[in-house]
Image (cartoon, grey):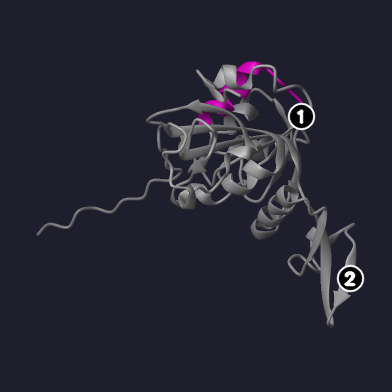
């Protein structure tokens, strides 16, 4: 089956629909599938539930879907860089399911591994624990968290081959690999597209069996949320 598509719009054509749950990889603005996010915006799909570590920043990444009000609910860990997110949430226009970051990561990993739920100590005795099952193991209290599984995952990889085998680089490995396994339909944008067999099998992070479609996005813009510099000291 041919997996490589000419652009992000065709890679998502006929896939994105109203009311879907979408996982979007990346950490901050590192490793976000920006081209695929742009294609979701262009599709006009609305009432989306988006699972992502954060919501990008104003005007960038998932922030562009907040501008068009296509997102109904976010399942996230950190949203502090996005003023529009805060405005919509405080106005009751956006639902938020907030998670400790490690819990979010494990919920996604569990979804991809077919694990429906697990117990964790994180959040016990806090607002996070409200309405969740609690049990005691070896004298310690734990709360139950459910695994997450989406209709679509969109991920960004540093390298991929035509069979969908993916390699991530540095911080982009944070959420992209686990999200690639935790949906019915994974679409990947890759910076470097190579023929099948060119990637050493020991270096593959996501096997191609998880990836349905690929789009080549060479030289994507590498954005920084907050650039901090110091004045050069004269010699």
Q: Where 59 sits versus 111, above or below?
A: above
Residue 80 appears anywhere in the view: no
In terms of secondary structure, where does tag 1 sit? loop
Residue 233 in the figure: left or right of residue 130 = left
> Which residue appears at 76% of the width and 47% of the height?
148
Q: Callout 1: few (<14), some (14-19), or many (20+) C-alpha neighbours within 10 Å?
A: some
Image coordinates of residue 36 in percent, x first then y, are: 56, 27
Residue 103 appears anywhere in the view: yes
Q: CA distance from mark 2 to mark 1?
A: 32 Å
Q: Callout 2: few (<14), some (14-19), or many (20+) C-alpha neighbours within 10 Å?
A: some
In terms of secondary structure, where does tag 2 sit? strand
Q: Which residues are magenta?
A: 34-47
> Which residue appears at 76% of the width and 29% of the height?
20
Q: Nearer the viewer, residue 173 or 76?
A: 173
Residue 57 picture quarter: top right
Q: Where 142 sits versus 63, above or below?
A: below
Image coordinates of residue 120 in percent, x first then y, are: 77, 66
Q: Which residue is mark 2?
A: 135
Magenta portion: prevailing SS class: helix
Q: Quadrant of the N terminus?
A: top right
Residue 134 picture quarter: bottom right
| Magenta region includes residue 195 | no
> Which residue appears at 68% of the width and 53% of the height?
109
Image coordinates of residue 35 in percent, x first then y, are: 52, 27
In the picture, the disc for residue 20 is: 1
Q: Earlier in the sequence, mark 2 or mark 1?
A: 1
Task: Name the residue at the left extreme.
Answer: 235
């Amino acid at each position: 089956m041919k997996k490589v598509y000419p652009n992000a719009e065709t890679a998502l054509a006929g896939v994105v629909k109203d009311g879907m749950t979408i996982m979007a990889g990346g950490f901050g603005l590192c490793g976000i599938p920006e081209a695929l996010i742009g294609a979701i915006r262009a599709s006009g799909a609305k009432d989306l539930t988006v699972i992502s570590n954060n919501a990008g920043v104003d005007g960038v990444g998932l922030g562009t879907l907040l501008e068009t009000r296509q997102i109904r609910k976010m399942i996230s860990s950190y949203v502090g860089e996005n003023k529009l997110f805060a405005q919509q949430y405080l106005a009751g226009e956006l639902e938020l399911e907030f998670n400790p970051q490690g819990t979010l990561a494990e919920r996604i990993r569990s979804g991809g591994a077919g694990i429906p739920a697990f117990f964790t100590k994180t959040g016990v005795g806090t607002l996070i624990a409200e309405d969740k099952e609690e049990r005691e193991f070896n004298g310690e209290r734990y709360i139950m968290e459910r695994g997450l599984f989406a209709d679509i995952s969109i991920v960004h990889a540093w390298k991929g081959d035509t069979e969908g085998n993916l390699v991530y680089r540095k911080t982009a490995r944070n959420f992209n690999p686990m999200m690639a396994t935790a949906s019915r339909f994974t679409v990947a944008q890759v910076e470097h597209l190579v023929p099948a067999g060119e990637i050493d099998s020991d270096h593959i992070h996501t096997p191609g069996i998880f990836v349905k479609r690929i789009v080549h996005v060479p030289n994507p813009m590498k954005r920084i949320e907050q650039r901090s510099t110091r004045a050069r000291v004269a010699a």
